[in-house]
Image: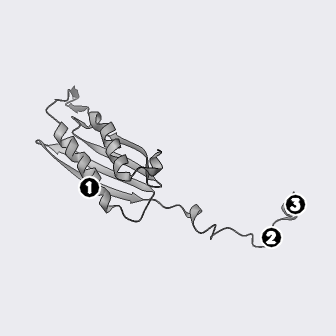
Amino acid sequence: MGMESTPLARQMDYAFRQMESELIHSAAGTVTIQIRNDVIGKYGICHNPIESRNGVIEEESSESGLKADQVLAFRKLALDALQYKRGWTHGEIRFDFSVRKGSWSAGITFESNYNMANIANGMFRLQPKYGAPHALRDAP
């Protein structure tokens, strides 16, 4: 069974499960889900777990960042967010998240993409104004 026949919610659940170990202890970042024909093609996390103060790199504490139960809640939020995706099959969903003083928050952005090349069998196909030059007209 290919991903084309798998519901988008199940694909989203799978993607978040794959990123779970990276999300745990992440203090902030953006999860990006790229969708084409209602199939998740690429997904990942943009974050920088390295922080410095006064030019010294500090080790990230296991107390900072998302906890396992918060990652589970994040995954549920992502699944719930799919109900707001309407009328498009190509695009991207971004989840910006941060953890402060033990609580976490996330903002969700939907981006739809459309491709003019696929519209109405070339509705806007370029037609030469005066016909093709002689050499091109007689070419095999």
Q: Residues within 10 Å of mark 1 (few under 14, many from 20)?
A: few
Q: Residues within 10 Å of mark 3 (few under 14, many from 20)?
A: few
Question: Mark 3 belongs to which amino acid?
Answer: Ala
Residue 120, quarter of picture: bottom right
Give above or below for 60 relative to 139: above
Side (left or right) of 76 relative to 120: left
Which of labels 1 and 2 is toward the front? 1
Quadrant showing the C terminus? bottom right
Question: Mark 2 belongs to which amino acid?
Answer: Gly
Q: Regarding mark 2 in the picture, which secondary structure is present there?
A: loop
Residue 47 visible at all: no
Question: Mark 1 belongs to which amino acid?
Answer: Asp
Q: Regarding mark 3 in the picture, which secondary structure is present there?
A: helix
The answer to the question of whether label 3 and label 2 lie on touching residues, with beta carbons closer than 8 A, is no
Side (left or right) of 127 relative to 33: right
Q: Residue at x 27, y 49 (%)?
A: 96
Q: Which residue is mark 1?
A: 80
Residue 31 visible at all: yes
Which of labels 1 and 3 is toward the front? 1
**Percent position of residue 45, x then y:** 33, 41
The label on residue 131 is: 2
Q: Return the residue nearer the eye: 76 or 127.
A: 76
Judging from the image, the colouring scheme is: one colour
Q: Return the residue nearer the eye: 6 or 25.
A: 6
Q: Which residue is mark 3?
A: 135
**Comes first in the chain, label 1 or label 2:** 1
Distance between mark 1 and mark 2 Cα atoms? 55 Å
Q: Residues within 10 Å of mark 2 (few under 14, many from 20)?
A: few
